[in-house]
Image (cartoon, rainbow, N blue to C red):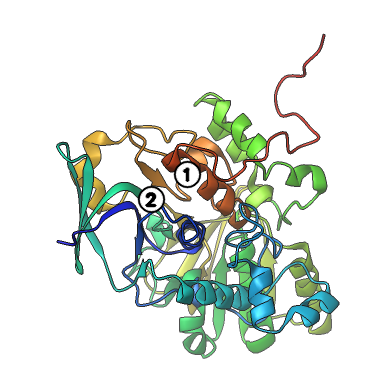
Amino acid sequence: MNDIIYDIVGIGIGPFNLGLAALTHTIPELKCLFIDQRPDFTWHGGMMIPGTKLQVPFYADLVTLADPCSRYSYMNFLKQKQRMFRFAIREDYYIQRSTYNEYCRWVAEQLPSLLFNCKCESVHWDETTELYTLCTGSGMFRTKHLVIGIGSTPFIPALAKEGSHPFLFHSADYLFRKEELLHQQRITIVGSGQSAAEIFYDLLQDFNGELYWFTRSARFFPMDYSKLTLEMSTPDYIDHFYSLSDETKPKVLSGQDALYKGINASLIEAIYSALCEKPSANVHLHTNSELRKIDRDGRLHFYHTELQKEFSLASDAVVMATGYQNAKPDFLKPVSSLLTEKIKRNYSIDQRQTIFVQNAEMETHGFNAPDLSLGPYRNAVILNGILGREHFTIERNTCFQSFGLPEID
């Protein structure tokens, strides 16, 4: 067993825990370790389509909104790579996904607290020492606090599980399967969000067969980037949402798809331009179409929700752009009795407030949970709680609008 007693061990090294590691690196009283079962940092490798961009601006990096003076900011990355002037002249707030991945890898290379090729197998609590012990493939580690940032996993509906179609996969694996995909005669994309749109646009450039895009949504929704809507991506709105009743929260979330599931307006324009420049009877877009069944011979059965009629078609390949889901990790089972049913406002999930989660709190904190721009804020809240002081200043009264009742004399 490692003799070091850590203040924080982070499990999973995605952008959120990587940002936490970067922020902790400048706090000398904290001994931290971050582990991940992967060999190195890679962010959505199967969707690193050339030209695709983030849906948040460049300053929503790993650290800036918590510590704008950090050496791990995106602006310092540009300076160190001698790209500052090109970036300034270009005046494009939304950077390419591949550049963001390069930036994250640049940060990861500088942090000695990261340990890859290390899988957490179980977590145990010692009442006597008040420490958690992590059993991993690389040894045992003891810590006072845990931060779980394992990310979400690709979600495929039960009707489309493995074996339901001879060539079906999740959008997360798109680039890994693209070469094989291009040899098919008919491809069907199922889904309505950014990933579906990016794959559709990419195939418009390279695929010459029949291309179908189905969504059960009433239309291809653009992401809402209007200014007053963006005020909902703030601590003020998180406070408001957290205060809502457990009965109200799901109803509110169900009406917020355009706030986090929509498509970039610029991508919709690019798709439309491509359709105009390359008109083809082989390209089909359909809304209000809910996938109900898949036959093993490759036939897909849909239900048109407005016409209330069924229809079907055969497809050689199916790309399921059906999002991601969170699951409680098995390694927490030994400490399950310590966990609370509801995630606390400070992102802790145990009574002692020593286990924290990243991007697992949508049902309690709102649609902003997976938003990269709120990662530094959440990390600041977590670290302030662990330190017992406001090491990072939390901005308050950030919005012009109020999400609750008006204060009227």
Say whether disc 1 or disc 2 marks the residue closer to the N-terminus. 2
Taking the spot 49% from the left edge, 34% from the top edge, the residue there is 345
Amino acid type, callout 1: Ile
Q: Nearer the viewer, residue 55 or 4?
A: 4
Indicate the quadrant containing the N terminus: top left, top right, bottom left or bottom right. Answer: bottom left
Q: Secondary structure at mark 2?
A: strand
* Residue 254 pos. (x, y %): 59, 39
Q: Residue furthest top?
A: 409
Q: Residue furthest front?
A: 28
- Tell me if I can see residue 154 in this picture: no
Would you call the spot at circle 1 few (<14 residues within 10 Å), some (14-19), or many (20 or more)?
many
- Viewed as shown, does residue 162 lie left or right of 110? left
Q: Quadrant of residue 231?
A: top right
Q: Which residue is identified by label 2? A: 147
- Viewed as shown, does residue 107 lie left or right of 206? left
- Viewed as shown, does residue 113 lie left or right of 85? left
Q: Secondary structure at mark 1?
A: helix
Contact? badges 1 and 2 (CB < 8 Å): yes
Q: Nearer the viewer, residue 64 or 314?
A: 64
Taking the spot 70% from the left edge, 41% from the top edge, the residue there is 232
Taking the spot 38% from the left edge, 66% from the top edge, the residue there is 113
Q: Nearer the viewer, residue 130 or 180?
A: 130
Would you call the spot at circle 2 few (<14 residues within 10 Å), some (14-19), or many (20 or more)?
many
* 237 shown above or below 5: above
Q: Which residue is identified by label 1? A: 382
* Residue 61 pos. (x, y %): 62, 62
Q: Quadrant of residue 140?
A: bottom left
